[in-house]
Image (tube, grey):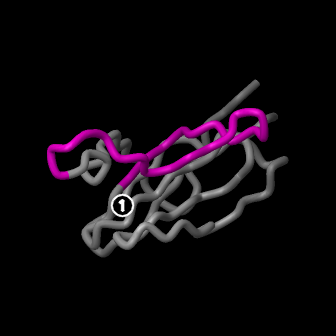
Amino acid sequence: MRTLSLFLGALALTAVVPHAVADGTGVQTVFSLDPNLGQNPEGVAVDHKGNVFLTVAPTGDLLKRDKKGNLTTHAHFDRGAGFLLGMTVDKADNVYVVRSEER
């Protein structure tokens, strides 16, 4: 049975990526993932600085793409602890992530 537990704070869901569309010329790729490697995107959030965060279920990675296009692993969570799901960013740019747990 799966239960949802809150990881890193309060729950809120966000599904907007304002930096995903370029200057009217077309769509810009924000993240490139390989589903064959288990890189299935789940939650997306954008902070006030323009950084885009993406949870990758079930790898446990929280990815960050900054305004310059640099991609880093912002945090990594144990794969056996459940899937990373939705997330949000508060006014102070703290990132909150929801994780499901297997029981």
At x 71%, y 52%, the residue is: 60
Q: Residues within 10 Å of mark 1 (few under 14, many from 20)?
A: many
Q: In this view, which residue lies farthest toward the left?
A: 24
x, y (%) of residue 98?
55, 47
Q: Please determine whether, in this image, residue 59 is positioned above or below residue 50.
A: above
Q: Quadrant of residue 63?
A: bottom right
The image quadrant of residue 40 is: top right
- Residue 76, image x, y percentages: 70, 63
Q: Nearer the viewer, residue 98 or 25?
A: 25
| The C terminus sits in image quarter | top right
In the depicted structure, whether residue 33 falls above or below residue 68: above
In-image side of 41 versus 23 (left or right): right
Q: Residue furthest front?
A: 25
- Residue in the picture at 25% in, 68% down: 48
The type of residue carrying mark 1 is: Val
Q: In the image, which residues are magenta?
A: 23-45
Question: Looking at the image, which residue sits at the far top?
Answer: 1
In what quadrant of the picture does the N terminus appear?
top right
Q: Where does the image place residue 53, in percent across and percent down from the top left?
A: 46, 58
**Going 56% across and 46% down the picture, which residue do you hit?**
32
Residue 88 inside the magenta-drawn segment: no
Secondary structure of residue under mark 1: strand
Total label count?
1
Q: Residue at x 54, y 66 (%)?
A: 71
Residue located beneath label 1 in the image = 89
Residue 37, x across and y down, in percent: 78, 40
Viewer-nearest residue: 100 or 17: 17
